[in-house]
Image: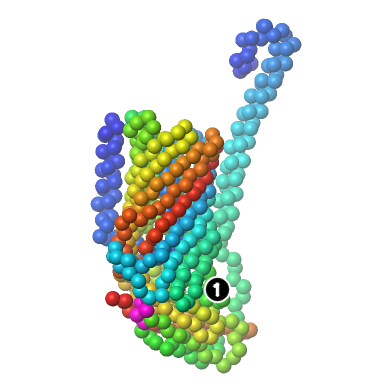
């Protein structure tokens, strides 16, 4: 096997020494080759692992069983104003309910909600101009109800 | 030959620009999704090679702008984010390579006078892209085409005290996007080269129960020079135009206060610390901005990163 450039010096080293050298170099070469292959596959494995882990993050957990929806938990959902000027006005929105709720969740399609519980404050910047929907979800231990209210945010100028 | 390639590249740039004229751009109003960095690591270093990157980015917006004019209205104080991005690339051949990158917001916050602050954190979007290196030579330079998809794998419904945080601070953009970019690089002396990048991002519509929104296209156009100051130190200076059009909401109602045109000056230093490891830092300094309507405008940006090539 003439894979070793040192083979040319083989005659000068004497047979046992040269053979030893040869074996060592073949071993080194094979080891290097194996290490290269290993590195390639380990790298690929790392890549796939990270990719799959990240992909799995995207998969949503199955939601826990939700309470049944009912339509008489919320008595009313009221706002102190129905039209706001962007960046300037705020409004208080209150949910009235005849039960002691387990939780009250709020969300808005555009704009910002501050506070929590049965009364929150809503406002919107200039990028939220238009009619926006604020959703309130009340949950008791067995039931859940959602109501929405619409607030118009008009331009600052 | 090199002039021919350069002209071809310019023609390609122009045709993209003509196909998507600025007047018809529609883009994101809020700083949704992963922030753009300035990774110019497009060269294919050879078959079966990996490259990894870890970036940190910070951005601060502490003023509202009406057009180019700073104004002081309402309760807005400032917004900022601290963001980490991880990327991993693999060269399938000497021409083709794939890259995946995703980011994590340590915080993405808005601060208001009287109302405190709103802070979200978590996984942002993920981008998977395919690069094709058309040519690479001393005479012609380097030309790389890239296309990819941005997947909204991160958090888009984060709550605090059972109240959903505003869309602006949600870590993920909530929308699937397609991207296309072209990168060109050419040496003009032993120590220097210039580079340019044009990139386009097109968003899909978000259509959930109570939220209908369409971010428009985003253009990033970058041109810069790189100078090898020392054996292991490169200095770069680029200009980046960040063009975002207007967004659409609820049955295609135009969001007037969305979209912007911002030009950044982007100085950077790259240090090849080890044979396969490089470190870089850079800043984003806005030198021109035009915000449609009234919007918060970026004040300063900072980026630091690590690159490892196998």
Residue at the image point whose x is 74% and y is 11% from the top: A16
- Residue A70 percent location from the top left of the image: 55, 86
Chain letter behind tag 1:
B
Residue at the image point whose x is 41% and y is 72% from the top: B76
Reply above or below: A54 against B277.
below
Q: Name the side, left or right, on which A89 lies relative to B49.
A: left
Give the dominant element type of the magenta stretch: helix, strand or loop.
loop
The stretch in magenta equals: A84-88
Which residue was labeled with disc 1? B160
Reply above or below: A52 against B190.
below
Residue at the image point whose x is 66% and y is 28% from the top: A31
Q: Name the side, left or right, on which B220 lies relative to B173.
A: left
Name the quarter where the N terminus of chain A is drawn. top right
Please name whichever residue, B17 or A143, is drawn nearer the observer in this view of the structure.
B17
Reply above or below: B37 against B203.
above
Colour scheme employed for the rendering of this structure: rainbow
Query: Could you say whether the residue bearing mark 1 is in a helix, strand or loop?
Result: strand
- Residue B36 percent location from the top left of the image: 42, 54
Please name whichever residue, B99 or A94, is drawn nearer the observer in this view of the structure.
A94
Residue at the image point whose x is 50% and y is 71% from the top: B118
């Amino acid at each position: 096997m003439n894979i070793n450039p040192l083979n040319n010096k083989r005659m000068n080293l004497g047979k046992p020494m040269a053979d030893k050298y040869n074996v060592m170099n073949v071993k080194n070469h094979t080891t290097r080759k194996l290490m290269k292959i290993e590195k390639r596959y380990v790298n690929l494995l790392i890549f796939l692992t990270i990719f799959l882990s990240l992909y799995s993050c995207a998969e949503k957990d199955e939601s826990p069983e939700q309470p049944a929806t009912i339509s008489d938990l919320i008595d009313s959902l009221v706002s102190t104003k129905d039209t706001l000027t962007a960046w300037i006005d705020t409004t208080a929105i209150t949910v009235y309910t005849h039960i002691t709720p387990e939780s009250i969740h709020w969300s808005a399609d555009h704009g910002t909600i501050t506070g929590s519980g049965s009364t929150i404050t809503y406002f919107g910047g200039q990028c939220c101009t238009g009619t926006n929907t604020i959703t309130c979800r009340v949950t008791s231990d067995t039931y859940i109800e959602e109501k929405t209210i619409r607030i118009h945010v008009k331009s600052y100028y | 030959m090199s002039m021919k390639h350069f002209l071809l590249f310019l023609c390609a740039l122009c045709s993209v620009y003509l196909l998507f004229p600025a007047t018809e751009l529609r883009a994101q109003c809020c700083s949704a999704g992963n922030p753009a960095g300035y990774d110019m690591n497009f060269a294919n270093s050879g078959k079966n090679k990996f490259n990894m990157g870890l970036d940190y980015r910070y951005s601060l917006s502490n003023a509202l702008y009406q057009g180019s004019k700073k104004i002081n209205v309402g309760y807005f104080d400032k917004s900022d984010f601290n963001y980490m991005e991880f990327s991993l690339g693999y060269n399938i051949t000497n021409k083709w390579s794939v890259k995946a990158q995703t980011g994590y917001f340590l915080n993405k916050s808005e601060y208001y006078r009287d109302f405190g602050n709103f802070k979200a954190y978590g996984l942002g979007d993920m981008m998977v892209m395919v690069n094709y290196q058309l040519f690479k030579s001393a005479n012609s330079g380097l030309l790389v085409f890239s296309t990819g998809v941005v997947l909204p794998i991160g958090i888009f419904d984060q709550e605090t005290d059972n109240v959903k945080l505003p869309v602006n601070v949600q870590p993920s953009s909530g929308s699937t996007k397609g991207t296309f970019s072209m990168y060109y690089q050419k040496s003009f002396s032993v120590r220097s080269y210039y580079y340019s990048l044009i990139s386009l991002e097109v968003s899909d519509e978000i259509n959930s129960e109570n939220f209908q929104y369409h971010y428009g296209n985003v253009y990033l156009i970058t041109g810069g020079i790189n100078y090898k100051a020392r054996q292991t130190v490169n200095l770069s200076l680029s200009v980046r135009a960040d063009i975002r059009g207007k967004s659409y909401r609820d049955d295609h109602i135009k969001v007037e206060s969305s979209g912007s045109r911002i030009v950044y000056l982007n100085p950077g230093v790259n240090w090849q610390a080890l044979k396969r490891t490089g470190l870089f830092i850079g800043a984003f300094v806005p030198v021109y901005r035009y915000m449609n309507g009234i919007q918060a405008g970026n004040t300063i940006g900072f980026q630091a990163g690590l690159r490892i090539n196998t």
